[in-house]
Image: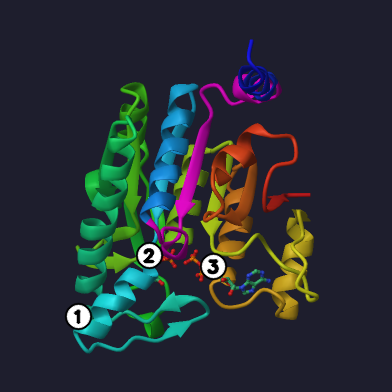
């Protein structure tokens, strides 16, 4: 055996208990807009997802795309504001949000996974009424909070070893279109599936404390305190609120990690040290 083969064999040996542990597990991965910058980054993410599927995990990709929405809004001369990490969404904005997320961004991820040898299916929460929403807050306009999550379509795709890629768009009781924050959509889907892991991929190494250090292990109580104190702010608010709701909804653990790091997902799932901030109920 050459040196390289020996190293690969050692790595695989280390990974083996984790591979077995995760067999037939459900892992929901939220890919944030800031984490999907480069083509190489996207290709690497797609390879990781295909590898997960190959070892028997059921991956579900839920994506964001905030920067891509901002770019088109700017080109069209439409302005939008954020309140506690959520976009204030009027009727015109929601049409643009759906176009960007369910069209451009969703298909880019589907294509990357299929190029890496997987069989991805691109959906939004409107498909098979997967995400039915109520209005989150009248001040935010067409921003939705999922109230009913129908996972039957996802289970059919699991049986056929396909990889669902879901844009965070939902439908309302009156057939309205709702813009759902990507983290919120991923959390609702993970809870409905009682997922083994919810991975929130973003552009920071994890949840940072007041001194700027990443906290690797967090309990729900500590995270709640950090949010009340204001250490957690902006786009991190929907992530931490999602993490807490998902844990209470039956997800085993939530990890917030840097999606731009090569093989971030594999490092988290298949090494003993993991990556980012892991949050558990307590
Ligand atoms: N305590 C914190 N730890 C880490 N990041 C934080 C914290 N508070 C606020 N943030 C901000 O949250 C951002 C991540 O949210 P966001 O930009 O919405 O990401 P994404 O597009 O991946 O969903 C980070 O880039 C950082 O600026
Ligand atoms: C209600 C709300 O804020 N929706 C988000 C949906 C996209 C998203 O969540 O994108 P990131 O994950 O890249 O931040 C938005 O309009 O930007």
**Disc assigned to residue 100:** none
- Tell me the SS state at disc 3: helix
Q: Where is residue 74? Give x, y as percent.
A: 27, 84
> As displayed, is residue 149 above or below residue 184?
above
The span shown in magenta is 14-38
Q: Where does the image place residue 139, in percent across and percent down from the top left?
A: 40, 85
Q: Position of residue 196 (x, y in %)?
A: 58, 36
> Residue at coordinates 31% horizontally, 43% vertically from top-left?
112
Taking the view exactly as shown, the residue that stands out farthest to the front is 2
Q: Are marks 2 and 1 in contact (CB under 8 Å)?
A: no
Q: Earlier in the sequence, mark 1 or mark 3?
A: 1
Chosen colour scheme: rainbow
Residue highlighted by disc 3: 238
Which residue in the protein does label 2 denote? 180
In front here: 38 or 83?
38
At horizontal 70% and vertical 80% (from top left) the residue drawn is 230
Residue 33 lies in the magenta stretch: yes
Task: Specify whether tag 2 is near ligand 2 (CB below 8 Å).
Answer: yes
Task: For marks 2 and 1, give the CA distance.
Answer: 15 Å
Ligand 2 lies in which image quarter? bottom left
Callout 2 touching callout 3 (CB < 8 Å): no
Kindly identify which residue carries mark 1. Answer: 92
| Residue 157 vertical position relative to residue 173 in the rendered view, above or below | above
Q: Percent from the top left, x then y, of residue 282? A: 79, 49
Ligand 1 contact, mark 3 (Cβ < 8 Å): yes
265 displayed left or right of 213? left
């Amino acid at each position: 055996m050459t040196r390289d083969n020996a190293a690969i064999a050692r790595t695989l040996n280390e990974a083996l208990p984790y591979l077995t542990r995760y067999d037939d597990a459900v892992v929901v991965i939220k890919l944030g807009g800031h984490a999907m910058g480069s083509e190489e980054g996207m290709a690497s993410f797609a390879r990781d997802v295909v590898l997960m599927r190959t070892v028997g995990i059921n991956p579900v990709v839920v994506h964001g795309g905030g920067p891509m929405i901002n770019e088109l809004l700017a080109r069209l001369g439409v302005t939008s504001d954020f309140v506690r990490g959520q976009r204030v969404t009027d009727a015109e904005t929601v049409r643009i949000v759906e176009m960007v997320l369910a069209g451009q961004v969703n298909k880019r991820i589907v294509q990357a996974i299929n190029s890496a040898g997987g069989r991805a299916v691109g959906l939004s929460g409107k498909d098979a009424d997967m995400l039915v929403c109520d209005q989150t807050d009248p001040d935010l306009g067409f921003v939705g909070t999922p109230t009913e999550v129908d996972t039957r379509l996802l289970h059919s795709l699991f049986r056929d070893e396909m990889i669902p890629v879901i844009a965070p768009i939902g439908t309302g009781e009156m057939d309205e279109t709702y813009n759902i924050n990507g983290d919120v959509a991923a959390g609702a889907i993970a809870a409905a599936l009682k997922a083994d892991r919810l991975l929130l991929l973003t552009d920071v190494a994890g949840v940072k404390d007041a001194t700027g250090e990443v906290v690797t292990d967090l309990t729900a109580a500590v995270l709640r305190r950090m949010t009340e104190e204001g250490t957690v702010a902006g786009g991190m608010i929907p992530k931490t609120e999602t993490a807490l709701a998902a844990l209470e909804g039956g997800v085993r653990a939530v990890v917030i990690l840097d999606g731009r790091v090569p093989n971030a997902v594999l490092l988290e799932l298949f090494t003993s040290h993991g990556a980012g901030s892991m949050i558990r109920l307590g």
